[in-house]
Amino acid sequence: MRLAELSDATGVAVATLKYYQREGLLHPGRALSRTQADYDATHVERVRLVRALTEVGGMSLARVKRVVDVLASPGEDRLHVLEAAQRTLAGDGTGVPACDDDVVVPRGRVHEWMDRRGWEVDPADPFIEDLERAWAACDSVGIGLDEERMDRYADHMEGVADVDVRSVPSEAEAAVRHVVLGTVLVDPVLVALRRLAQQHVSRTIERTRP
Amino acid sequence: MRLAELSDATGVAVATLKYYQREGLLHPGRALSRTQADYDATHVERVRLVRALTEVGGMSLARVKRVVDVLASPGEDRLHVLEAAQRTLAGDGTGVPACDDDVVVPRGRVHEWMDRRGWEVDPADPFIEDLERAWAACDSVGIGLDEERMDRYADHMEGVADVDVRSVPSEAEAAVRHVVLGTVLVDPVLVALRRLAQQHVSRTIERTRP
DNA sequence: TGACATTGGATAGTAACGCTCCCCAAAATG
DNA sequence: CATTTTGGGGAGCGTTACTATCCAATGTCA
């Protein structure tokens, strides 16, 4: 399969494929000569992966590269697949947001809440920071998220996570791929489901007590 | 409050505030003279809103403008607040993705699935399209999402939506604000909760069957 | 009163991102 | 032998979200 055929197979322009190669997102084809290379199914798969992560997952190419590198690297041991995947995906946090002096972000509010809840999570997990910021953002615009509501959300996300974790395949390589892609690509699924469920629930409720 | 003070209060540069004014994201201050204007708490609130939606919600300024316009417009009737909010927020879909001829996106797969599930949703809801794409993206990279798994996700998102809908305040204006902001700003909360829950669940499971 | 800061208004510049286009000479295809 | 395609590389482009600079009019403070 030549570059133009890869382009046809994926619907991605030749120039873009070259660009992906330059950026290290697409591994080079098997060189048949100095001006001819052979691309196979792995290239098609890779291109689709890149497009799925950018278009649906909304990731930048830089982050896609990190994911791609993890997927290509020798398999991490199975037990820590999830942590490895999360480390790869973390860093959404654009650092510390210019802190608004009057909206006090209670330091460690998430830690305390998780302690009460009995969640066991690495205290240095970057997503704790993300949650802290997201929670504070809700406060800063005046839509309070009290701990009870947070708990009810957490109940359901625990259920989601249970589905997530149990559907991870057992072989190491597939597991890494599954966790990384599942984490990124299922987020949009959940978001869309939430919107649709909101509509369904609000209609149901309105019928029972209009 | 002068512009410089608004800048101090929000941590946003004066030049950026001017830019937001030009873009219609920030309403002008009360003009005291041709070179002096007075800004109040509504301006502080607005700036915080813009920053929350862009930094945490990851929205573009163009989309923030749509939200801001809805919040400023005369209140829609309470019953359709949610639909109005969703309409405002929809359009994430960058249109039809360059369709890969070999990854057949089953037309109406989501419709069929929702029928079986008994969800009542506007058949033209844009999030159906989003879900369709997100689901197809999972398939295209080889992480199948079968209907059973989708159902289990949906169960939990239904629970989330129930929390969402029940926590909407009853006065119309607050309701619109709550729905719009809750929809955008709670997504990151849920995503972070999912990551943390994944870690908690995987640790718990690994202890019971290592 | 006068030095200095700030204002609205406007234009232009910047940096990152994700392509997209064009060039080349070597090689393959028809 | 003309045309197409290749790898390689550089340059350009459109969008986004600022940021910087300039202006003359107007405030503020000593």
Image (cartoon, coloured by chain):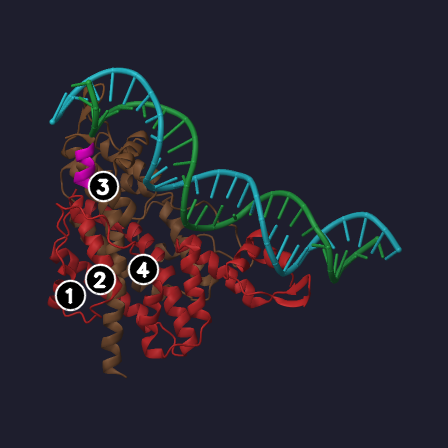
Chain colours: A brown, B red, C cyan, D green
**Residue B95 magenta-drawn?**
no
The kind of secondary structure element at disc 2 is helix
Amino acid found under the numbered disc labelled 4 = Gly
The earlier-in-sequence mark between 2 and 4 is 4
- Give the residue type at disc 1: Met
Asked if labels 4 and 1 touch by Cβ distance under 8 angstroms, the answer is no
Tell me the distance, in whole angstroms, between the alpha carbons under discs 4 and 3: 23 Å
Mark 1 sits on what residue? B114
Q: Looking at the image, is A179 positioned above or below residue B24? A: above
Whether label 1 touches label 3, CB < 8 Å:
no
The residue that mark 2 highlights is: B128
Q: Give percent across and percent down for residue A12.
A: 24, 40
The first of marks 1 and 4 along the sequence is 4
Mark 2, residues whose alpha carbon is within 10 Å: few (<14), some, or many (≥20)? many
Q: Which residue is mark 4?
A: B91
Q: Which residue is mark 3?
A: A49
Q: Are marks 4 and 3 in contact (CB under 8 Å)?
A: no
